[in-house]
Structures are given as structure tokens and as C-alpha cells.
Image: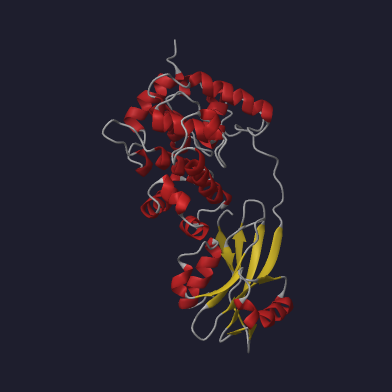
Amino acid sequence: MTASVASRLLRWFDRHGRKDLPWQQADAAGRRDAYRVWLSEVMLQQTQVATVIGYFERFVSALPNLPALAAADEDTVLALWSGLGYYRRARFLHRAAQLCVQQHHGELPRDFDALSALPGIGRSTAGAILAQAHGLRFAILDGNVKRVLTRHHGIHGEPGQSAVEKQLWQHAEAHTPGTRVADYTQAIMDLGATVCVRSRPRCEACPLAADCIARRDDLTALLPTRKAGKRTPTRSTVMLILRDRQGRMLLERRGPQGVWAGLWSLPEAADVEAAWRLAQQHARIDDAQPLAAFTHVFSHYRLQIEPLLFERATAQQAIADAPQMRWCSASELTALGLPAPVRSLLANLATPLLSEHFTFEEKP
């Protein structure tokens, strides 16, 4: 008889699991900080561990606990998040912290319903927080876990479909043990991240290989079922870099909806002619220098960006009366939430500029 999924995963975890991640630190009683667990779970959505570690350490150094996050202004939070992408996660994190201060005495609630009701905390994230921080028996179902369970049980159909997701939750609940829940949740996530990977899974190293249906039926390349491929559309924009004689650059806060919502960015226009007209509205200008074009790849479209540099610009008075616009020095940019390609573009102004088209890939 094959041992249970949980017992095999725990044995594997004891030998091969990741135990030194910064959010796994525990106190003398072996308890993990719920705030750090929560932050890591949100950062790890759509993002790999290797990328998250540096962001996590900078974030908790600046905002070490939930009350500190709640008290921070949005620009500070978005600046710390800048480059991680999917910025809605950061805004939900910030809002949830404020609600915890207002409604839960400055702590994440230990009640599942209250926790999952907070912005950005769904069923799986709530389960992960309660399991890893408090050792409570709650299942998780992130992308890695879905892949493990889909292959192990031979489940066909896109994991995002309600009927498929219902099956996966049933398996996740059934396999979650009553003890060592924190280790189990880390184990099944680690297995998906390091062994049962999307392409070329290392089945020979998997503790669940003996009764994995996908391995038995040679379906590992087909499961989980992928969404039907769609052609990625391409859009284009001209970004205006207005720089005055003091080296300050004009930034504009984006609106509350759409890509990069709420972040500070560069003014944009549909084409070069419109860019000139817009630049003249914002400042007195002499000439413009086209910089190297580049492509930013989102998860759902490609954005071709043509930067246009206006040196020695002189601000129009109207800018002083527009709260959504501001002139910023290079040092002030570090304290603002900027889209990663915009931050890189402005940083490149201090170095020789690229003369060829290049691609910048990062998710929104």
C-alpha cells in the first residue's frame, strides 16, 4: 500500500525542502510571524522565489510590521514594490493593513472568514497564512499546488474552470494533514516549484511518482491543460521625458484604473506630433531628442515605447497647480512608485543611451 501523500511529502521536505527562506524565520516557540508570511504569499503570486527574496527583505526592512505598513503612504509602498509587477497586489496589501488596524487591533485575524474578507486575500492565501503562521489545518491551492495535484490525480481541463478547481480543492483538503501543516504546505509548494515544474518535470526525484497518473499515462507535457493560445496584440506609445536645467524630470501620476494604476510615470502621447503638442502644454521647449525605442511585454499585450527627450525644459505655471504632476530630481525618484521600465529608462539617462531597439520583459 502506498503511503499517504502528506507523509511522503513531509519525508521529502525533511531532506530536500527549503527551510531558510526569510519569511520562514520563527521565534523561540517555533511560531512564524503572520505579517511576514502574508507579505511573502502576496509577493509570490505570479512571481518566483528567487525574484521575491530581495524585494521581501527591502520591504520588511522599511516596513517591519503591519502597523508600519498601515501608516505608510501609498507612494512609499509602491516604491518598495516597484519592479515586482501586478501593482494591484501592493495596493490591496496596503488597504488590508489599514483595515486590520481599524478592525482587528493591528493584527491579521486568525478567523478564516475574517481573514479571507480582507482585500487581496483569497481562500488559498488565507489558508497559507493560517497554516504557516499558526499551524491551523487549512488547505492551499496556488499555481504550484494545482500543477502537482492535476498531474498526480490526472485531472483534465483548465485549472481555472470552476468544475476543475472544485476537484482540486477537494484533493487539497483531503491531503492536508492534521499535524505539521506549516511544513506540509511548504513541501507541496516546493515540490511544484523545484520538481513538478511546468516543463520537463523531474519525475525521477518526485516522492509522489509511484502513483502519479500523469507519469503513468505519459501526460506530464499535457497536464495541467493550457488555455487556448491567443495572439498577443501590440500597442505603441510615445513617452515624454521633460528635463529642466536643474535635471528634474516631469512625472505624471496615472489614474486609478488600467495598467500601472496609481503609479508615477512619464506623460504619454499617441505619436510624435501629439507628443510635441503635449510637451508644449507642460513646458517651454526648444528641441527634442529621440531615444532608443524598446518593447515592454505584459502578460496580455506588448507595448512599444518611443522615448522623446526634451532637454532644458521650463515648466509652465499650470504644472504647479496640478497635483497629479510634479517635477522630480533623480534622488526623489527613488521614493516614488514607478513602473520598472520607466525607472530603467530614467536611470539610463545618466549612462550612454542604447542605439538599437531592445525588449524589456516584466509583468504589470
Seen at 42% across and 18% down, the residue is 178
Q: Measuring from the top left, give residue 57's x and y in whole percent.
A: 37, 51
> Residue 269 versus residue 297: which sits nearer the camera?
269
Q: Quadrant of residue 267?
A: bottom right
Q: Quadrant of residue 226?
A: top right
Q: Is residue 264 above or below residue 93?
A: below
Q: Residue furthest top?
A: 1
Seen at 53% across and 50% down, the residue is 90
Seen at 53% across and 26% down, the residue is 215
> Residue 320 versus residue 263: which sits nearer the camera?
320
Q: Measuring from the top left, give residue 264's x and y in whole percent.
A: 57, 65
Seen at 51% across and 79% down, the residue is 248
The number of discs equals: 0
Q: Colour scheme in the image?
A: secondary structure
Quadrant in the picture for the N terminus: top left
> Residue 196 versus residue 119: which sits nearer the camera?
119
Q: Measuring from the top left, give residue 274's x and y in whole percent.
A: 73, 76
Quadrant in the picture for the C terminus: bottom right
Q: Measuring from the top left, give residue 273's x and y in whole percent.
A: 73, 79
Q: Is residue 266 above or below residue 144?
A: below
Q: Residue furthest left?
A: 28
